[in-house]
Image (cartoon, rainbow, N blue to C red):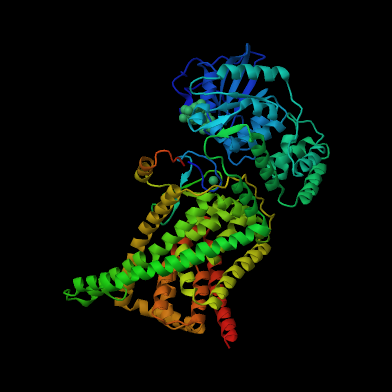
Amino acid sequence: MPEASRSTQAAKSAAGPACHAGPPAPAAPAGAARVALIGAPNVGKSALFHRLTGHYVTVSNYPGTSVEVTRGSAWLGGRPAEVLDTPGLYSLLAWTDEERVARRIVLSGEADVVVHVVDAKALERMLPLTLQLLESGRPLVVALNMIDEASRLGVEVDARRLSARLGVAVVPVVAVEGRGVEELGRAIAAALAAGARPVRILYGNSVGEAMLSVRERLVGVYPVDPASFVALLFQGDSEVAAEVARREPDGGSAARAAVDRATTALGAPASYRISVERRRLSGELLDGAIVRAGANPPRWLDVLGRLLTRPATGIPVLLIVLYFGLYAFVGQFGAGTVVDWLEGGFERYVTPFFESLFAPVPWAPVRSLFVGEYGLLTLGLRYAVAIILPIVGAFFLFFSVLEDSGYFPRLALLVDRVFKPLGLSGRAVIPMVLGFACDTMATMVTRTLETRRERVIATLLLALAIPCSAQLGVILAILSGEPLALAAWVAAIAGSFLLVGALGARVLPGAPARFHMELPPLRRPRAGNVFLKTYTRMHWYFLEVLPLFLLASVLLWIGNLTGLFGVAVSALTPVVGLLDLPPETAAVFLFGFFRRDYGAAGLFDLDRAGSLDAVQLAVAAVTLTLFVPCIAQFLMMVRERGVRTAVGMLVFITPFAFGGGLLVNLLLRRLAG
Amino acid sequence: MTCAFCGREFEEDRGQPACQQCPLGADCRAVRCPYCGYENPVPPPWLVKLRHWLVPHDAH
Ligand SMILES: Nc1nc2c(ncn2[C@@H]2O[C@H](COP(=O)(O)OP(=O)(O)OP(=O)(O)O)[C@@H](O)[C@H]2O)c(=O)[nH]1
Ligand SMILES: [Mg+2]
Ligand SMILES: [Zn+2]
């Protein structure tokens, strides 16, 4: 028993009124069987716990952790038992401290019976964990909870058929009402009496063979069947690898070699093959055991989901998605058609209206603050409303459709291989994808990456080669009529991403980060969800952008009055001249350092004015994209990676961006003859 | 809520609100998933209510 045991009023909200603080709970009688309730968050473990146990519960920290585990005593099938309520667990592959504790309760063999509590409404998502629990060989009972809600939703589960297929009892219950709880108690007692089960590995598609080949190498003494360690070894779980090393007479080297061999045989990455196989097998086990009124999740989505993660099919699909989503929808429609329309409105009605409003104001400087070249209303407001808003709106709509469909985790799987030589894992897809929405936020998200090496490389690549949504939209729009310029821009940005990533991986020593995740199902995006997400993101973006754009107008106004702006522009003019760009672009670069999107809007304006030819557009687009992030992103880089690293990146990026522009200029001019 | 990236469920208050840590100080209404780190947008409550009112059975 844990030392830190204390009796408390059940701390968890779900505990309900049934438990009172009392005298220290009586310890479970000697010889009481231990029953652990395991399952995903929110499936009703605590509700079931309180149905199974009496009024006295103890809440204590799991030994060596700050994670609370609740215990209570019960009589199950005429036997005394101690029941453990555990934190939610999605898979034995644990990500959080809570999950690690729940997993340890399973793998340490401290439970005599494991009760897998599942949500009958979402069985497809729950069965992969059942399969993992089966591998432990411990007595197992499945509590099919929430059948009340399931039948309200038209989902009927054939518990008997499922039980026959799994080889363990499956008991329908409604934990909140206590329905089925007695039957569950009897099933637990029966499972206890039956004792350990022989482990069957049900996987097909050569995954089962691979797992068996490793299982055979595990000859040490384990508290549960080591079959349950095998998948975790494939998934590179360090805690489990250490335990295997401790328990194997040869320090686990035979098992490691077997994992490596089997990984090669499976064709990387093994951990995906395993989780995909688990999902397939879950579907097969449920086939005919679950009846859904109306929508059975369509089979073709499963097939499509698999195609998306294979390079041969996934990459073409990715290119098609990017072409239609980004180029056609965001670039041509959002940044082209819609912006044209709004800008027309501003030109014809809004700007003249404001100008006439301020015409009577006698002081020219005040007038110019509002309606001048860099006026609050004629520039700040116009940039935000007529240029940025439609572009980011189109982008967020596209983004939310992909997000809601479950495409992103598949993208992570797909690019895991491409990312490896860059020192990144598929996990880095999360900040990279978010970077297209906002690089500043994405820089903060890099802290969730596992190693410092990966964090530094991801931060650098975000600053260098991931344009934000507004920038991307504007660039696609202005380059859309110039295929050569567009190709040059794509090549320059993708090339920089790969080159700098590969260099970063060279310079920063370290093991390649491992990546593994269980895939959520692919689904048809829902209009309601997509709308909510798009609206939320646009709302946030606009609230953030508008004051900053207005502030920029004020700063420019002050800069103009004092002549400082002119000084800065003329300091940049020779640099811009080196790139064969007209002097006006210097101002755009200054805007760009203030905010990426502001610079993008400036570039858009320049293009409108017809001041740039195709080569100049490409050069300006490449330089602005590669060029340092805006101030906000830089501040975030300092905060997340420290001053030295952030300044180092700045020092690297600035000449790299201008060098990139120079190179594109030379190449394109030569090509153009 | 359900994370839009990894599909796991978590209590909204268990995810860290990203805005508090952001130097922009803007209220971006995003909550970071405790499992994978993805920033999930959280729609304003009135809009969620409106949706339930319009489409009562369309749970997310
Ligand atoms: N309709 C219905 N609701 C249930 C049932 N069982 C639990 N619930 C509800 O589901 C919610 C989650 O239940 P909990 O018992 O807290 O779930 P849990 O598995 O302990 O969750 P975590 O501790 O967060 O992992 C609560 O609101 C319960 O009232 C059931 O059989 N039917
Ligand atoms: Mg609970
Ligand atoms: Zn997540």
Q: Position of residue B3 (x, y in %)?
A: 51, 45
| Quarter of image, res A81 | top right
| Quarter of image, res A286 | top right
Q: Position of residue A124 (x, y in %)?
A: 60, 37
Q: Nearer the viewer, residue A10 or B55?
A: B55
Farthest residue toward the front? Answer: A294
Q: Position of residue A123 (x, y in %)?
A: 58, 34
Count of numbered tags: 0
What residue sits 68% from the left and 22% below the top? Answer: A112
What residue sits 53% from the left and 50% below the top? Answer: A405
Look at the picture and state if A292 lies above or below B16: above
> Where is the C terminus of chain A found, in terms of image quarters?
bottom right
Farthest residue toward the bottom? Answer: A673
> Where is the N terminus of chain A found, in terms of image quarters?
top right
Look at the picture and state if A424 lies above or below A39: below
What residue sits 74% from the left and 41% below the top? Answer: A204
Residue A189 visible in the picture: yes
Residue B20 visible in the picture: no
Q: Nearer the viewer, residue A663 or A333?
A: A333
Look at the picture and state if A102 lies above or below A431: above
Q: Position of residue A111 (x, y in %)?
A: 66, 24
Image-based side of A145 in relation to B13, left or right: right
Q: Nearer the viewer, residue A488 or A619?
A: A488
Q: Nearer the viewer, residue A492 or A595?
A: A492
